[in-house]
Structures are given as C-alpha cells and as structure tokens.
C-alpha cells in the first residue's frame, strides 16, 4: 500500500499538516476496506457469543438455586402452610410455601426449555 502524505515542516501546526491519504493503488484500498468489514463482523459475532455465554451462566445459577429450594422443600415437613418472604421482580412478597414451590417449578421448567 503506497500512501502519499503531504510534506510537513517541523514548524507547521498539526491542523495544517493533516494526513490526507492519497492511495495510489485502489485495489489495496478495496482489500483494506473489506478486511475492516470482516473484522467488524467478527467483533460483533464475538460480542454476541460472550453475551450468550453470560446468559447461559446466569440461567445455570438460577437453575441451581431453584433445585436447592425444591430439595429443601422436599426435606422439610409442613412448609406448605408456612408463610415465607420471597424476592420476586424487585419486591419482597409473603407467600405460602405451596405457592412458592409452584412458582419455582414453573421457572425451572421455563429454564429447562432453553
């Protein structure tokens, strides 16, 4: 790639000495533009992969917490009638154990579908 830059004297200011690139080979410029587009596309795809990976990790953590709670309910007697505070959608709600168990089971089923 041959680039012709304007001559700059040591006393000239940066604004006067702007790097006006004048390509002498248009094919090389086309290749550079194509490469830039491919790199941009690869970066976009890699960002999507990282987002998907983080989402999968988040779902796995949620599934583990759901399994923990469901196994606790299986071991504990009389949980169905007790009231528990649960954090749902930004609010603490007091619900009976049976209702919490059904909510967690539904959430677990939705997570298994992905």
Image (spheres, rainbow, N blue to C red):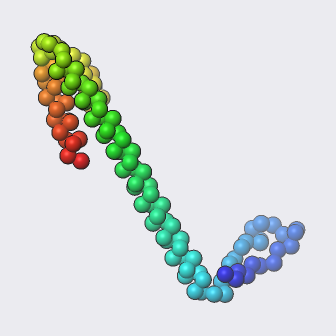
Q: Position of residue 42 (x, y in %)?
A: 46, 64
Of 94 and 107, which appears nearest the observer? 107
Task: Name above or below for residue 114 compared with residue 16.
Answer: above
**Residue at position x 88%, y 68% in the image:** 11
Residue 79 occupies which quadrant of the picture? top left
Q: Visible in this render: residue 94?
A: no
Residue 18 occupies which quadrant of the picture? bottom right
Instruction: Report whether 8 appears left or right of 82.
Output: right
Instruction: Report whether 41 appears left or right of 71.
Output: right
**Residue at position x 14%, y 13% in the image:** 77
**Residue at position x 40%, y 55% in the image:** 48
Instruction: Report whether 40 appears left or right of 12.
Output: left
Q: Position of residue 46 (x, y in %)?
A: 44, 57
Q: Position of residue 107 (x, y in %)?
A: 20, 36
Task: Name above or below for residue 32 compared with residue 77.
Answer: below
Instruction: Report whether 80 appears left or right of 17.
Output: left
Q: Position of residue 40 (x, y in %)?
A: 49, 65
Q: Visible in this render: residue 23?
A: yes
Task: Name above or below for residue 43 compared with residue 66.
Answer: below
Of 49 and 95, which appears nearest the observer? 49
Residue 103 occupies which quadrant of the picture? top left
- Count of numbered badges drawn on the protein: 0
Of 34 and 72, which appears nearest the observer? 72
Q: Quadrant of the N terminus?
A: bottom right
Task: Name above or below for residue 27 compared with residue 109.
Answer: below
């Amino acid at each position: 790639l041959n680039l012709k830059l304007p001559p700059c004297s040591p006393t000239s200011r940066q604004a006067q000495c702007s790097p006006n690139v004048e390509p002498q080979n248009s094919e090389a410029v086309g290749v550079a533009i194509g490469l830039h587009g491919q790199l941009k596309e690869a970066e976009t795809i890699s960002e999507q992969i990282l987002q998907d990976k983080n989402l999968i990790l988040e779902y796995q953590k949620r599934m583990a917490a759901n399994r923990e709670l469901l196994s606790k309910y299986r071991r504990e007697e009389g949980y169905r009638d007790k009231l528990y505070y649960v954090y749902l959608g930004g609010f603490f709600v007091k619900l009976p154990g049976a209702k919490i168990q059904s909510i967690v089971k539904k959430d677990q089923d939705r997570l298994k579908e992905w």
